[in-house]
Image: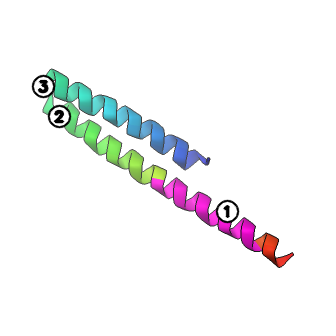
Amino acid sequence: MNKDQVKGRVEEAKGKIKETTGRVTGNPDMQDRGTVEKVAGKVQKNIGDVKEKVEDEMDDDMEDRR
């Protein structure tokens, strides 16, 4: 697991909390900020997933060349 995956998951969780808090308290601004943060976290996590997959493929490729 790389740092983008970890940071993305943290941001996604924080966004979910803000989104839920905004919904419960009737604060649409907080709910919207939470939704944006949650989506940004998912994007960052997905970037980390792609980076990890590329690194794994490169490692496999290097092993095949030996």
Q: Which class describes the residues within 10 Å of circle 3: few (<14), some (14-19), or many (20+)? A: few
SS at badge 2:
helix
Q: Amino acid at mark 1?
A: Asp
The C terminus - image quarter: bottom right
Spatial separation of the CA atoms under disc 1 and disc 2: 41 Å
Q: Nearer the viewer's eye, disc 2 or disc 3?
A: 3
In the rendered structure, the answer to whether residue 57 lies left or right of residue 27 reads right
Give residue 62's position: percent from left, percent from top: 78, 72
Q: Amino acid at mark 2?
A: Asp
Q: Nearer the viewer, residue 60 or 51?
A: 60
Spatial separation of the CA atoms under disc 1 and disc 3: 45 Å
Q: Which class describes the residues within 10 Å of circle 1: few (<14), some (14-19), or many (20+)? A: few
Q: Of the residues under marks 1 and 2, which one precedes in the sequence?
A: 2
Q: Amino acid at mark 3?
A: Gly
Does the stretch in magenta take in 53?
yes
Name the mark on residue 29: 2
- Please state the total of marks drawn on the protein image: 3
Q: How is the image coloured?
A: rainbow
Q: Which class describes the residues within 10 Å of circle 2: few (<14), some (14-19), or many (20+)? A: few
Q: Quadrant of residue 14?
A: top left
Q: Mark 1 sits on what residue?
A: 56
Spatial separation of the CA atoms under disc 2 and disc 3: 9 Å
Is mark 2 in CB contact (under 8 Å) with mark 3?
no
Q: Mark 3 sits on what residue?
A: 26
Residue range corresponding to the magenta coloring: 46-61
